[in-house]
Amino acid sequence: MTALLVGLFGIGGALLRFAVDGWLAGYPSPRRHWPWATLLVNVAGSFVIGLSMGLTASFAPEWRSALATGFAGGLTTFSSWTTATVRLASERRYLAAVVNVLANLLLGLAAAWAGIAISGG
């Protein structure tokens, strides 16, 4: 049952990530490419996992797995983040690469903390 819930919630997270990518692709930036969609889904996923720590504490463990591992895992993307960072560095946009690393890390930590704080976890 847990694996089925994780899979179903993972599909939802992956589809939401796909939608965010498509939505942000519709807004061309006058500046060079910046991985906004990746940053947005990673921060949102960190918040969801933090929130799930407190909100699902009284739920059955499979629901925590479904929300944190399934949904947030399907939503977030480590590989896109690292690839975007490597691409920025290969374009000699070193400051942008460092900002991308720090933004994902610091905003992700802040979002996870906020989720935990809000949920009372």
Image (tube, helix red, strand yellow):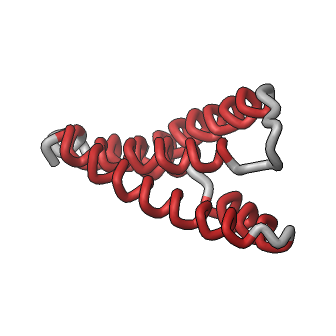
Q: Is residue 84 above or below residue 92?
A: above
Position of residue 62 measured from the top left corner of the image (x, y, whole percent): 34, 46
Give the quadrant of residue 14: top right
Q: Is residue 109 left or right of residue 97?
A: left
Residue, x 67% and y 68% (percent of image)?
95
Position of residue 102 measured from the top left corner of the image (x, y, whole percent): 52, 65
Residue, x 31% and y 49% (percent of image)?
50
Q: Is residue 16 left or right of residue 44?
A: right
Residue, x 29% and y 44% (percent of image)?
115
Q: Is residue 99 above or below residue 25?
A: below
Q: Is residue 55 left or right of residue 15?
A: left
Give the quadrant of residue 81: bottom right
Q: Is residue 48 above or below residue 81?
A: above
Quadrant of the frame with the N terminus? top left
Q: Nearer the viewer, residue 5 or 114?
A: 114
Residue, x 27% and y 52% (percent of image)?
113
Q: Nearer the viewer, residue 48 or 64?
A: 48
Position of residue 28 measured from the top left corner of the image (x, y, whole percent): 82, 32
Count of numbered tags = 0
Q: Nearer the viewer, residue 62 or 23?
A: 23
Residue ranking furthest to the right: 91
